[in-house]
Every structure is written in structure tokens, then in C-alpha cells.
């Protein structure tokens, strides 16, 4: 049996989901006001700062919490710290029937570097 490394899993997920840049995310939120920006980091990361207007559902409880929080027909852009967990989360949402899902390439770091609005 061959086992995969975490890096391999992250890379495979990134290849299977749409990746958007921070600039793309800002533009999409302007063009599609119903777009959900979903932060899937841990509570301590969220508390240190997060994107303005983001919805917070930690990766560990995503599957059990997302349906009550986000309708399946919404555009969803997920971010984490660097883009690994968000790729896995985006792939999971696709399996759950969310059709318009993307992962923020570079995560929260890219958001900050691009001048995205911060709360917290």
C-alpha cells in the first residue's frame, strides 16, 4: 500500500478545485454581493484577525455545520492561513453539492498582502 504525504494531498486538492487570488476574491465579492467568504481556520487564528465580513466555520466542524449556514446555490470562497486547508475544504463542499466553490490561493496571508479589509 502506498501512502500519500500531506503535501501530496494538498497539491491534489488544489488541482481539483478552483483557485482564486485575493484580487479575484475582492472583485467577485463586488460583482456578486451574495458571495460567502468562508474562514476555515482555527478559533485562535480567527481571533487574531480575519477578512472583513467573513463567515467562520473551522475546518474540523465544516461538514456538520456548513449546510445550516450556507445555501448550496451560493458562491463560496474559502480561505485558511496559506491555502492548504481551504483546498481540502473546497473539495469537501463540492462533494456535498456546492457547485460554485473556490479556494483562496495563498490564504489569509495573500489577503493581507493584497490589502484586503481586516476585522479583529
Image (tube, rainbow, N blue to C red):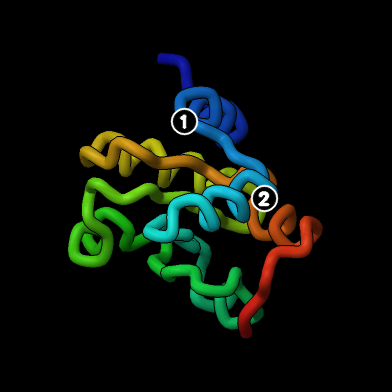
Q: Extreme front residue here?
A: 31
Question: In x, y percent, where is residue 43?
Answer: 50, 76
**Picture layout, residue 50 above or below residue 107:** below
SS class, disc 2: helix
Instruction: State the residue at coordinates (22%, 55%).
Output: 71
Q: Is residue 59 visible?
A: no
Residue depicted at 58% across the width and 82% down the height: 47
Q: Secondary structure beneath disc 1?
A: loop
Residue 28 percent across, percent down from the top left:
53, 49
99 above or below 80?
A: above
Q: Which quadrant holds residue 69? A: bottom left
Crowding at mark 2 (Cα within 10 Å: few <14, some 14-19, many 20+): many
Residue at x 27%, y 60% (from the top left corner): 70
Tag of residue 22 = 2
Q: Residue at x 50, y 32 (%)?
A: 18
As measured in the structure, the alpha-carbon distance from the residue carrying label 1 to the one carrying label 2 is 16 Å
Residue 17, numbered circle = 1
Q: Residues within 10 Å of mark 1 (few under 14, many from 20)?
A: many
Q: Is residue 21 left or right of residue 39?
A: right
Amino acid at each position: 500500500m502506498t501512502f500519500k504525504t500531506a503535501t501530496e494531498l494538498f497539491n491534489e486538492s488544489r488541482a481539483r478545485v478552483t483557485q482564486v487570488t485575493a484580487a479575484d476574491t475582492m472583485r467577485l465579492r463586488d460583482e456578486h454581493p451574495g458571495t460567502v467568504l468562508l474562514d476555515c481556520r482555527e478559533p485562535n487564528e480567527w481571533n487574531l484577525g480575519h477578512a472583513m465580513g467573513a463567515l467562520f466555520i473551522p475546518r474540523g466542524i465544516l461538514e456538520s455545520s456548513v449546510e445550516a449556514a450556507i445555501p448550496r446555490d451560493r458562491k463560496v470562497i474559502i480561505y485558511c492561513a496559506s491555502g492548504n486547508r481551504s483546498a481540502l475544504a473546497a473539495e469537501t463542499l463540492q462533494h456535498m453539492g456546492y457547485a460554485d466553490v473556490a479556494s483562496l490561493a495563498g490564504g489569509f496571508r495573500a489577503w493581507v498582502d493584497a490589502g484586503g479589509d481586516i476585522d479583529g
